[in-house]
Image (cartoon, rainbow, N blue to C red):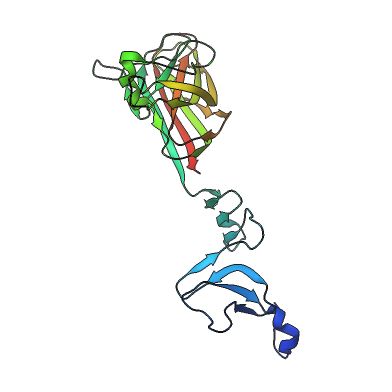
């Protein structure tokens, strides 16, 4: 590193740092840190405040903290308005959304909502299966009529704009017969107009899909989803669907969705 020893100020002033308020120094008002010729840096200070603000361009590394090996453990990205942390540089506001069901009894080729919490379908006091189509993909709209109340535990209501970063599944069935299990993650617009159509779903959009093969009670099949669309707007709802493609064996399922708030 360089030294200012035995060097004249007239030859080194550009390398010196100062606050912009040359008359008062550091006060209770933010003042930019400048070099000796008045070029402002991204740093502003006061006696109680410290601010980093780009002067010209937003970047993905506006602020960084590294360990001694040079790996980032904290990054502030002003290009994408996010903060990333840890050795994996994950979003600081990452969340896990959990869908799960125990003993969901399907009809082959039908898509069923998976509860947005642990759902037990095994007894009369348990949950009721709600279907959403028999096509290759779930239906993109649903008026559940007098079973709309059964959707309460099966939908995640997005409180903010968010982004889906990934999803994983585990699945098994209750017999020795191999089957194919399909998974779909959707977002919907849910009617909330204060009328009799409140709770109806429309504008269904595929977020992610996955498939597990050779599923039976002797295995726990696991894997990841393929993301098709990652953006979910505030007040939209997220639903997870499962389909037993080949038989009516009960399904035990867990899906975990990684997302972050925008």
Residue 244: percent from the left, percent from the top? 46, 13
Side (left or right) of 79 relative to 236: right
Q: Is residue 217 visible?
A: no
Residue 130 falls in image quadrant: top left
Q: Is residue 65 above or below residue 146?
A: below
Residue 15 falls in image quadrant: bottom right
Residue at horizontal 64%, vertical 63%?
Answer: 55
Q: Residue furthest left?
A: 125
Q: Is residue 207 above or below residue 181?
A: below
Side (left or right) of 68 relative to 102: right
- Of residues 234 and 156, the one nearer the viewer is 234
Q: Is residue 23 visible?
A: yes
Residue 82: percent from the left, percent from the top? 54, 50
Residue 243: percent from the left, percent from the top? 47, 16
Residue at horizontal 51%, vertical 18%?
Answer: 182
- Of residues 171 and 124, the one nearer the viewer is 124
Residue 183: percent from the left, percent from the top? 50, 21
Count of labels in the image = 0
């Amino acid at each position: 590193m360089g030294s200012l020893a035995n060097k004249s100020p007239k030859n080194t002033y550009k390398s010196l740092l100062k606050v912009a308020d040359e008359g008062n120094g550091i006060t209770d008002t933010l003042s930019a840190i400048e070099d000796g010729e008045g070029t402002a840096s991204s740093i502003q200070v006061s006696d109680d405040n410290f601010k980093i603000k780009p002067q010209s361009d937003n970047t993905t590394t506006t602020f960084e903290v590294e360990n001694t090996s040079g790996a980032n453990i904290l990054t502030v990205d002003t290009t994408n308005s996010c903060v990333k942390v840890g050795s994996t540089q994950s979003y600081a506001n990452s969340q896990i959304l959990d869908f799960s069901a125990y003993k969901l009894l399907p009809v082959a080729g039908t898509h069923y909502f998976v509860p947005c919490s642990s759902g037990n379908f095994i007894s009369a006091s348990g949950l009721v299966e709600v279907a959403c189509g028999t096509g290759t993909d779930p239906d993109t709209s649903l008026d559940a009529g007098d079973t709309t109340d059964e959707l309460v535990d099966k939908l995640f209501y997005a409180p903010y704009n968010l982004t889906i970063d990934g999803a994983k599944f585990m699945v098994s069935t209750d017999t020795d017969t191999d089957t194919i299990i399909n998974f779909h993650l959707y977002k919907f617009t849910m009617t909330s107009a204060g009328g009799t159509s409140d709770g109806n779903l429309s504008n269904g959009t595929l977020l992610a899909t996955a498939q597990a093969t050779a599923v039976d009670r002797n295995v726990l099949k696991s894997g990841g989803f393929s993301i098709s669309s990652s953006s979910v707007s505030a007040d939209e709802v997220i639903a997870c669907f499962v389909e037993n493609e080949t038989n009516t064996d009960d399904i035990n399922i867990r899906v975990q969705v990684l997302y972050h708030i925008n």
